[in-house]
Image: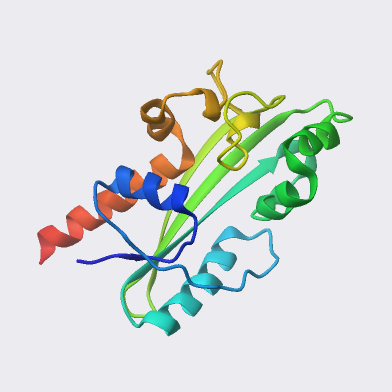
Amino acid sequence: MKLHFATSNINKLRELSTLLEQKLISVPLDLQEIQTTDLHELLKFKLQQAYEKLHAPVIVEDTSLYFNAWNKLPGPLIKWFLEGMGLEGLVKALSPFEDKSAHAVCCLALTDDGKNIHFFEGKIKGLIVEPRGSRKFGWDAIFQATGKQETFSEMSIKEKNHISPRGIAAAKFKQFLRLRAERK
């Protein structure tokens, strides 16, 4: 089955294609993003828009970064926090708080028909640290997974993909696709 991936982010496309071991059809749609801390609500909204434009099986993806000291923030709004504050600004804004723990969540959502939605979620705990490593991919340079000494940016792609929320969500999605293909 051909899978359309509604994204204009080449890094996400490359990473998810690698994780799924499948070439995804990139569809750079201009989708509205509602401002919410509910990741599933956000994805459902984006997925419905994408399906209305394509009328074909489509997936959307979003990643959230939650600072435990900030409750549900930045969450799915991390993209806007990064644009407004940058990596150093985020770390500085968290500095008055003793709790530097965080968790990252990635969720993939699929619809074949525009009505039924399947969610695949990956989650990992960690700490927010001073930026280290490459700054080419979102917040990777400030997130250090629990039990690791490196930020996501400092890890090899293979190691990051094995433990990252996107890697976990993609593994669940891949299993779903495999089981669905076996049933046909």
Q: Nearer the viewer, residue 74 or 23?
A: 23
Q: Is residue 95 left or right of residue 19?
A: right
Please tell me which residue is depicted at 68% across the width and 27% down the height of the picture: 131
Q: From the image, which quarter does the N terminus lie in?
A: bottom left
Q: Give the vertical position of 43 relative to 65 (above or below).
A: below
Q: Nearer the viewer, residue 14 or 120?
A: 14
Residue 73 shows in this picture: no
Q: Give the vertical position of 55 relative to 29 (above or below).
A: below
* View extreme (top): residue: 149
Q: Give the vertical position of 126 relative to 122 (above or below).
A: above
Q: Nearer the viewer, residue 131 or 76?
A: 131
Numbered label tally:
0
Q: Is residue 165 left or right of residue 16?
A: right
Please tell me which residue is depicted at 75% across the width and 42% down the height of the picture: 86
Query: In x, y percent, where is residue 141?
Result: 61, 30
Q: Nearer the viewer, residue 29 or 43?
A: 29
Residue 16 shows in this picture: yes
Q: Give the vertical position of 179 relative to 158 (above or below).
A: below
Query: In x, y percent, where is residue 139?
Result: 62, 39
Please tell me which residue is depicted at 33% across the width and 48% down the height of the picture: 172
Q: From the image, which quarter does the C terminus lie in?
A: bottom left
Query: In x, y percent, where is residue 95?
Result: 84, 29
Q: Is residue 137 left or right of residue 175?
A: right
Please tell me which residue is depicted at 81% across the width and 38% down the height of the picture: 89
Q: Is residue 18 left or right of residue 1?
A: right
